[in-house]
Image: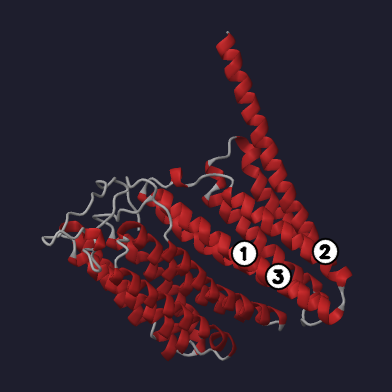
Amino acid sequence: MTSSPTPPPSSTPPPSPSGTPAHARPVRRLTARGRADVHRAATPLELFFDLCFVVAVAQAGIQLVHSVAESHTGEGLINYAMVFFAIWWAWMNFTWFASAYDNDDVLYRVVTLIQIAGVLVLAAGVSPAFEEHDFLAVWLGYLIMRFAMTAQWLRAARSSEGPERAMALRYAGGVVLCQIGWVGLLLLPEGGRAWLFLVMALLEMCVPVYAEKDRPTAWHPHHIAERYGLFTIIVLGETIAAATVAVKSGFEENQALDELLPIAAGGLLIIFAAWWIYFVVPIHGHLRSSREAFVWGYGHYVVFASAAAIGAGLEVAVEQAVGKAHLSTLAASAAVTLPTALYLLTVWALHARHFKVGLTQQLVLPVTALLVICCTFLGEWAVLAAGLVSALSVATGTTLTARRAARASAQRASDAAG
């Protein structure tokens, strides 16, 4: 998943003996791409892949709403964490593999479409997993996705040699062994599943570390940053869509505009601020070493999960406001403010802190997260207040950055004049 050295740039494939260019063949060798590739951008297949994965994200969010609204918050959060990990981990493994090995031939496309089919099977199993604790469909969907990923790594191993081949085989073997471990979700009693999840999640995350100990994959920093950014946009878009549907439904059924308007306005401000804060700095230049890339890539589990949970929290707040949810105003407010604070802190840890200069700039997002949590106790105005605080955070950060840039520019002009 990560890389420190810079592999050689890819070259144009030679023609076949028949004179047909290699890139025109339906099946080609799956060789590593170069980190020096220019104009490396997300492909239409990758964008399609992301959109289909968000179907599963939406299903997980819907079930989280139902769990929280029915006062089964603890159980719902555990199920959400487990299901979201399966979605995120399969997406992330494909993303890093594609950044290093995407040759866009027919076989690569077919195997990727099989992975998409797997996530749709997983999405169909989200409801039984939450409501009946039946993880069969979730496990089956994950199995399909992991089987396809194993096939991709075996193709890469077949087209390589030496340390690269060993790395690809370690990936394939690690994926298979972990998938066997996940069978425990079907066999263990309910009380042991959460512990199995923790163990298996750690083992899954150790596979890339072990596989790449001798030879890292040739992922492309700008491409990876773009892929993560695009998925963040899609998740935030799904959050807006879910909140909009909830507000529309609540207004049509209850005509409770006074109760819903503050939630709608606050939710919109939160999501706008979430987008702004994530994309205010270009992160690809920071992805240089293996350690940085692992921490950044793994940390996005929290970014994606909390972003999706904000939408679920807004739906819970709407249902509570119109009397459809069996929980207090405090609990409904916390369903929005807590994931918002978690998102702000995680984005600060992964992105913003690397670009902030001085204590004042560094404290903006952590203080904002703390103030958002404090907004939880403001009753029916909690969501609106959290939105205003988030927007104020963006304004504060923008002002501080502009002032520092102006001072630096004035200092350079003064030095030139002197």
Image quadrant in which you'd find residue 209: bottom left
Which residue is pictured at 73% across the width and 57% down the height? 269
Which residue is pictured at 85% across the width and 80% down the height? 254
Residue under circle 2? Answer: 262
Q: Is residue 310 visible?
A: no
Mark 3 or mark 1: name the one nearer the start of the chain. 1
Circle 1: is it few (<14), some (14-19), or many (20+) Cα within 10 Å? some
Q: Secondary structure at mark 1?
A: helix
37 left or right, relative to 312: left
Is disc 1 in contact with disc 2, using a CB cutoff of under 8 Å? no
Residue under circle 1? Answer: 237
Q: Amino acid at mark 2?
A: Pro
Disc 3 versus disc 1: distance between alpha carbons?
10 Å
Q: Is residue 71 above or below residue 414?
A: below
| Residue farthest front in this picture | 19
Residue under circle 3? Answer: 243
The x and y percentages for residue 148 are: 33, 75
Q: Amino acid at mark 3?
A: Ala
Q: Is residue 239 visible?
A: yes
| Quarter occupied by the C terminus | top right
